[in-house]
Image (spheres, rainbow, N blue to C red):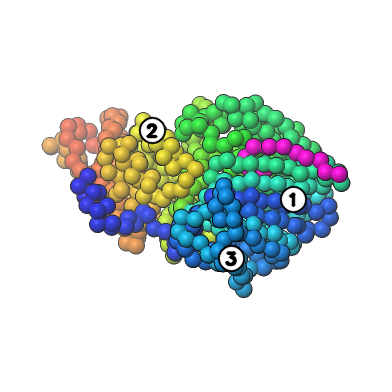
Amino acid sequence: MLGIALAALLQVPSPLAVVDDTIRPNVNALHYEIAIDLPDSGTEIHGRLALTYLVRRAGPVRLDFDTAFTVDSITEVLGLRRARPTRGTGWHRNPNGDVVLTPGVRTGDTVTATITYHGRPTDGLIIRNDVHGQRTAFADDWPNRARHWFPGIDHPSDKATAGFDITAPPGWEVVANGRLRGVDTLASGRTRWHWVESHRIPVYTMVIGAGHLAVTPMDTAGGVPVSVWTEPADSSFAVNGPFHRVDEIVRTFTRLFGPFPYEKLAHVESSTRFGGMENASAIFYDEKAYASGRMREATVAHETAHQWFGDAVTEYDWHHLWLSEGFATYFAAVFYQQIGEDSTFRTQLERAKRAYFASADTAHPVIDTTEHDLFRLLNRNNYQKGAWVLHMLRHEIGDSAFFGGLRDYYRIYRDSTALSSDLARVMSNRAGRPLGWFFRQWLLQPGFPRLRTSWAYVPAHHIVRITVREVQPAAWGVYRLTIPAEMLLADGTILHFEIHAAGRTTTVTRTGITAAPKSLTLDPQGDLLIQQEH
């Protein structure tokens, strides 16, 4: 405790708290009000964004935006209740399309900037015919593609509430984050949909979806309205297939982590490029998987887990993506364990282990500050190894501390952001002992332990000396491990014990051994990310 306090006093940065220098801390986005007019034909949209932000440090405000759009006007007002024009309002655009606001404001001011624009999205908002030939419009923002249909601070460190006013062609259904506040029918026969998300969410999960969709209400999960939105032709498959236990998934995660974080949960067939995209309260799934019957419940569990971890508790920086993807990967498996399908849980963990071992990602740590291609962060480190870090933490501290710590972590950082150092601190507090060593070795070191064992039996003294050597590449470092072991003796006796390994070579002595050992198995239950070499 003294060391931790001293580090805090001296403001020594934790390697588990690394952040990228692209984060812009001069403003804090408070609310996005997004109005989009979807066309009856073609792809040109007309949009209006009213962004309310708090000035943390006076100076220019840069909003990410695509050159494909023409900015028609920008107005800014100061204050929330008594709005008035800002002093010395001005703006310009960078060559990459970003909008740079230069209002005459001071630290602590609250500003609402309203930007009207039009153009054809090149990405982010996909307007096209779907696999059934029906015209649809779906946002697909991850990781920083929201800038292709509305201006904003396109980084997970800056979360905000959001509202959506979406005007759509006649007969279309429109879904977005949050709660539906109403639908207006215009004189033209077009409809205007009003959705409001009252919780702060990351920009990459702010979405709209629209088309001739069938909406099927499901069982309410603990007061949370759940629905499935599909092409009419895919409705029966979805409801009776991968989504038939969506209420049970929500109830299971609510019991494990805490209350569901949003006003509703919509599962939506869409044009996302991913198998599933965890948009807050409105998960989008790949239409091709629907049409081919390849959609699986495990994907639904993964994306639903993201509602807690990734959406409600968001990684402050992309290099901590495992706090989102590792969590969703692991708890998609845990869902099956919690409902009594332990073999499915074990199968998914083993599949994740094999995928990680076979990948080139073993050459890099989970928190890889050298990687700046965000799509390359969708790798076996952040998914499969991240899941195994959680499983090994659970093995290290036990279920009570593990799930209690997760509930603490969710409660503290809900609707906010976190770094790996925050998780390490919360779990250490719950476990009652420092766990920084655990997180540092599994997140900052590449690879995993490769273990080679040998033993020497001394029958005259009834002892066996067991040696465990870590033989992984030197670049991977060494690991501190508590390894369950199982030894089979010649007389059929099976001994169970633990080996506490630290360093390249560890030797332990077992006494009272009256028969020669025949075999030694490390981690017989398969709870560690290790390889035993012979």
Name the residue located 53 percent from the left edge and 65 percent from the top edge: 104
At a point 42% along the width and 56% down the height, the residue shown is: 367
The kind of residue on which mark 1 rests is Ala
Q: Earlier in the sequence, mark 1 or mark 2?
A: 1
Q: Earlier in the sequence, mark 1 or mark 3?
A: 3
User: Label 1 belongs to which residue?
Assistant: 137
Secondary element at image label 1: strand
Indicate whether residue 134 is drawn in magenta. no
**In the picture, residue 222 is in which quadrant?**
top right
State how far apart marks 2 and 3 are (Cα).
Answer: 50 Å
The span shown in magenta is: 175-187
- Amino acid on which the number 3 mark rests in the picture: Thr
Looking at the rendered structure, the secondary structure element under dot 3 is loop
Residue at the (65%, 26%) spot, across then down: 219
Residue beneath the point at 80% across and 43% down = 191
Q: Is residue 179 magenta?
A: yes
Does residue 425 appear in the picture of this structure?
A: yes
Mark 2 or mark 3, which has the lower sequence index?
Answer: 3
Residues under labels 1 and 3: Cα distance? Answer: 35 Å
Category of crowding for the residue at label 3, using alpha-carbon neighbours closer than 10 angstroms: few (below 14), some (14–19), many (at least 20): some
Mark 2 surroundings within 10 Å by alpha-carbon count, few (fewer than 14), some (14 through 19), many (20 or more): some
Q: Position of residue 114 (x, y in %)?
A: 64, 57
Towards the viewer: 484 or 201:
201
Label of residue 89 in the image: 3
The residue that disc 2 covers is 404
